[in-house]
Amino acid sequence: MAPPAPAAPVLATNADDGPFNPGDPLPLTVTGGTITAVAMTDKASGKPVAGDLARTGTGWASTGDLGYGSTYTLGVDTVGPDGSKHHDDRTVSTLKPAQTAYPSFIPPPAQTTVGVGQPLVVRFDHAVKDHATAEKALTVTSDPPQEGSWYWLSDTEVHYRPKVYW
């Protein structure tokens, strides 16, 4: 009788239960082995997606930009505790929003200087209902760093003002 085949390491990801948020990285974890390589590819364009493998080999996470309503293929190589090599192919998908808000900026992003009292204005092409989520997606970087906050004038327009003048 032939000995049983070695058990393959078990992979898990946040996409195992369905589409995931592309604003978050796609993490992979493994139990019963280590990850040796991951190839993630945008199925539509064929472009690879960057990622980082944990030094322990027990995890990997995408670091490249992911798109809404997209499908990605994953090829994952693992090694079991007995040294046996395994490969797992998967397909994962990102959430497809019912609607996407597109912003315009005042001043435009290419303008790198503003007046001392200039607010940064973001206007959306339609109403944004979840202001908190929109604010988390917006970042302001200045040199030197400035503390500030967002103020919604309407559901389509938000302003950022620094705590003190720029």
Image: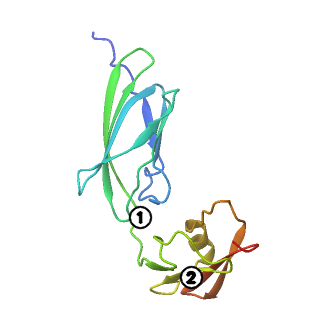
Is residue 42 toward the left or the right of residue 60 in the image? left
Three-letter residue code for mark 2: Lys
The residue depicted at 75 percent of the width and 72 percent of the height is 163
Residue at x-position 51% and y-position 28% = 55
Q: Residues within 10 Å of mark 1 (few under 14, many from 20)?
A: some
**Dots 1 and 2: beta carbons under 8 Å?**
no
**For numbered disc 1, what is the local secondary structure?**
loop
Residue 15 is situated, as x and y percent measured from the top left of the image, at 43, 52
Residue 101 seen in the current view: no
Colour style of the rendered protein structure: rainbow
Sequence order check, earlier mark of 1 and 2: 1
Viewer-nearest of labels 1 and 2?
Answer: 2
Looking at the picture, tell me which residue is in the foreground, 11 or 41. 41
Compare residues 123 and 145 and report the one nearer the observer: 145
The location of residue 108, given as percent across then percent down, is 47, 76
Answer with left or right where residue 14 lies relative to residue 148.
left
Q: Quadrant of residue 68?
A: bottom left
Placement of 132 over or under 80, stated as above or below: below
Could you say which disc has been placed on residue 95 in the image?
1
Amino acid type at mark 1:
Leu
C-alpha span from label 1 to label 2: 18 Å
Going 39% across and 60% down the picture, which residue do you hit? 94
Q: From the viewer's perspective, is residue 98 above or below residue 42? A: below
According to the picture, the residue beneath numbered tag 2 turns out to be 129
Q: For this view, does 80 lie left or right of residue 117?
A: left
Quadrant holding the C terminus: bottom right
Residue situated furthest bottom in the rendering: 154
